[in-house]
Image: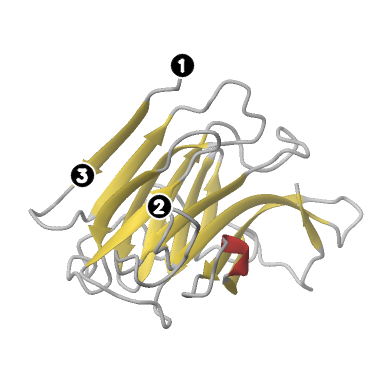
Amino acid sequence: MLPTLALALFSMSAGAKDRVTFRHTPLPGDERPVITEAVVGPQGNDFALRLTFNKPPFGAECGTRCANSTLLIDTDATASSGLKLEGKQAENGADLAIIIQGARDLSGASGDSYLRVKVRRLSNEAKTVDEGELIAELDHRKDPDRIHVEGSTVFLLIDASGDLPTGRKARIVYHPPGDKALQASLAGMAGGSSQGKVMIFRRGSWGKAPQGGTRVSPEPQTEPR
């Protein structure tokens, strides 16, 4: 029997949602950490995300089977631009892919684990997420103003100020492993409500989450876990 899936939409206006919340019950036997709750909302020229995993997304607890989750944002809520998968897939039309991975730093003797976030721009030619252009790669140790981790919860601020399509509405898609895709509409960069209303992540903090992370150099060699 499939697990119960719940999608709660919270709105501060009668129009597009100022933020949306996905909730997901992982399938029995999932080895990797899985997102069980995702809150997403526009914040100025960024999209802010709070992602809760069922266990720490990186580190000793997950060993070599750490987080590898992807969320997609259709920044103009239209299938005419962005990812083009075969068939009628919820992911079609996505313009931005956010990939959250537990990784290991190979540049030092200790092989420290850390959380990496890759952001890919999906053009009309992209037939898979991997074909998207890599426009950002974040490290929770080096980018505390963009990524912060508290236990099993990850706070992200993703820049959407580039040449992405814009609209009054956007669409977020999360496809849990082995289950159906979850999707919902929210206010886009041109929707107006992104300007000052959604204060879920600002200046490196979200709620009571303090700014964290330690800047490191030189650039480490890494591998996903």
Calculate the distance from the C-alpha at mark 2 to the C-alpha at mark 1: 24 Å
Residue 140 appears in which quarter of the rendering?
Answer: bottom right
Indicate the colouring scheme.
Answer: secondary structure
> Which of the two discs, 2 and 1, sits closer to the camera?
2
Q: Residue type at mark 2?
A: Lys
**Residue at 82% over, 65% down:** 221
* Residue at the farthest bottom position: 163
CB-based contact (under 8 Å), mark 3 and mark 2 = no
Name the residue rendered at 62%, 63% in the picture. 130
- Structural distance between the alpha carbons of marks 3 and 1: 28 Å
Residue 75 locus on image (x, y percent): 34, 67
Q: Provide the residue designation for mark 2.
A: 88
Q: Position of residue 94 (x, y in %)?
A: 42, 63
Q: Position of residue 162 (x, y in %)?
A: 43, 81
Of callouts 3 and 1, which one flags the residue occurring earlier in the amino acid sequence? 1
Q: Amino acid at mark 1?
A: Met
Asked which quadrant contains residue 66, the reply is top right
Nearest to N terminus: mark 3 or mark 2:
3
Q: Is residue 97 visible?
A: yes
The reply to whether callout 2 and callout 1 are in contact (CB within 8 Å) is no
Relative height, residue 148 to residue 75 (above, below): above
Q: Is residue 103 above or below residue 3?
A: below
State the residue position of label 3: 10
Foreground residue, 60 or 171? 171
- If you read the primary sequence from the N terminus, does the residue marked by circle 2 or circle 1 appear first? 1
Instruction: Say if residue 135 shows up in the picture.
Output: no
Q: Amino acid at mark 3?
A: Phe
Give the labeled residue for mark 1.
Answer: 1
